Amino acid sequence: MSTTASHPQRADVPAPSPTDFLGIDALLTDDERLIRDTVRTFVRDRVLPHIADWFEDHTFPRAMAKELGDLGLLGMHLHGYGCAGTSAVAYGLACLELEAGDSGFRSFVSVQGSLAMYAIWAHGSDEQKETWLPRMAAGDALGCFGLTEWDFGSDPGGMRTVARRDGSDYVLNGSKAWITNGSIADVAVVWARLDPQDGHRSGAVRGFLVPKGTKGFTTRNIEKKLSLRASITSELSFEDCRIPADAILPNVSGLRGPLSCLNEARYGIVWGSLGAARACYESALEYAKTRVQFDKPLAAFQLTQEKLVNMMLEINKGLLVALHVGRLKDDGRAHASHVSFGKLNNVREALAICREARTILGASGITLEYPVIRHMNNLESVLTYEGTSEIHTLILGQAITGESAFG
Ligand code: TGC
Ligand code: FAD
């Protein structure tokens, strides 16, 4: 016998909103809604009026870093050192709103807070934390995170960048590829292998803090990108780059160092990708209601309705996944593979939503007058970085079968 009474269908229940069909808003706390609304307003006022131009000009406006810092969005889920110390769910909501503006802005915040700052916060010395974190939280100093190399993307464990001990210094040699914020960063968190003694893949992976301007450290921007154009992507090169021994992150050794940071940034993408999807869905919905063909608005065609309904279903399902993973994280119960679940599902669905939205806008959908193709192109990068969809499939495959299928 059931112990709880179920309510009969009531006639006075309000109709669901097209933009929050399941009423997920009601599952948030007042604080979470306040942070969400603050970031949404910032994006509406400071990002959306300019983003098409920034995208077209292939630029990230450096001055925005300070504004993001003033809003408390840099390292916002970290505690101490001038960081806001919010919940994981609040951080996720901020990522969603930023990415509803552009993935480049969410990327900037991910790299600054979840990769560079988190690496220092979790694995750095007290002195490293005091030196960098307050300035980074304020947006006065920028960071980047150098893990990927030209020859080692999905398999960072093969990295060739080497740190050789020389007296009281380390000497770095090698290069890092596809590094967000690389050329504008004041400090690079660089993952390198300590002197390999027994050939390739030997020598522990360690993190190093390399300030901009250090002799032997140069950067070069990767140009002609057709995705994430409102974001700087660079190559970092190290040629006999000498750094003091205390530039090493003292508290972690091995690949789990950088991978622990990736968990944080991947979590932001679980939410962020849905922001891009929501922007495309809303744009397509609005367009479908006003664009008339065959004497009817597009929204009145069954095929268009099916597209819009599928988008709405996947956005709502994705939000429930994001919120659940966020609550697990705030509860200390999120496993890295829960984050892979969200990253794989939500980015894959978000990209499908953006592509479908593009079809509803027809020819108009290929211009920067509408946000759709910009988000669609951006999500091609999001699908690839922070672990490709194939890598997250293999992480989940290993989690459910116990078999590693990476190698
Ligand atoms: P594997 O032998 O499995 O593990 C090596 C060590 O790492 C530990 N570990 C983790 N620790 C914390 N979090 C995780 N998610 C972890 N996954 C593994 C593991 O326990 C082990 O520790 P220990 O102490 O026993 O040694 O390593 P593997 O070489 O087989 O690689 C596994 C694989 C393929 C999953 C990993 O390499 C991977 O995730 N590859 C994808 C690389 C990637 O995501 N790169 C992203 C670069 S940064 C970026 O893209 C920024 S984009 C900008 C933006 O975010 O906007
Ligand atoms: P590869 O690893 O060469 O993969 C190519 C294809 O092969 C993919 O489809 C992949 O899934 C597949 N594949 C690889 N291995 C397997 C396997 N075992 N089984 C099945 N399929 C497999 N990196 C950083 O360190 N810091 C950054 O700030 C950063 N920012 C980035 C910004 C942008 C805009 C982009 C595009 C990338 C950025 N990256 C950054 C790099 C990113 O993390 C890598 O591109 C990503 O890890 C994939 O590596 P790859 O591009 O070398 O592809």
Image (cartoon, rainbow, N blue to C red):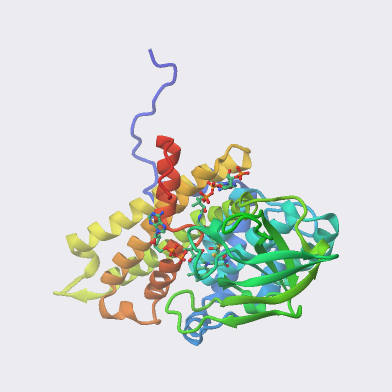
Q: Please name the residue shown 73% across and 53% down the image.
A: 123
- Residue 62 visible at all: no
Q: Quadrant of residue 374?
A: bottom left
Q: Is residue 306 left or right of residue 183?
A: left
Viewport quadrant of the N terminus: top left
Q: Please name the residue shown 44% across and 75% down the image.
A: 227
Give the residue furthest to the top.
1
Q: Please name the residue shown 64% across and 79% down the image.
A: 183
Between 170 and 361, the one nearer to me in the picture: 170
Q: Is residue 319 left or right of residue 160?
A: left
Against 78, residue 153 (above or below) is below
Between 132 and 147, the one nearer to me in the picture: 147
Q: Where does residue 289 sit, x and y in percent of width and height?
A: 29, 68
Q: Where does residue 45 sit, x and y in percent of width and height?
A: 57, 75
Against 323, residue 226 (above or below) is below
Q: Is residue 365 left or right of residue 391?
A: left
- Residue 400 visible at all: yes
Against 223, residue 322 (above or below) is above
Q: Where does residue 86 sit, x and y in percent of width and height?
A: 68, 51
Q: Quadrant of residue 18?
A: bottom left
Between 156 and 105, the one nearer to me in the picture: 156
Against 2, residue 244 (above or below) is below
Q: Where does residue 152 sit, x and y in percent of width and height?
A: 51, 64
Give the residue furthest to the bottom.
57
How many numbered tags mark residues here?
0
Give the residue furthest to the left.
294
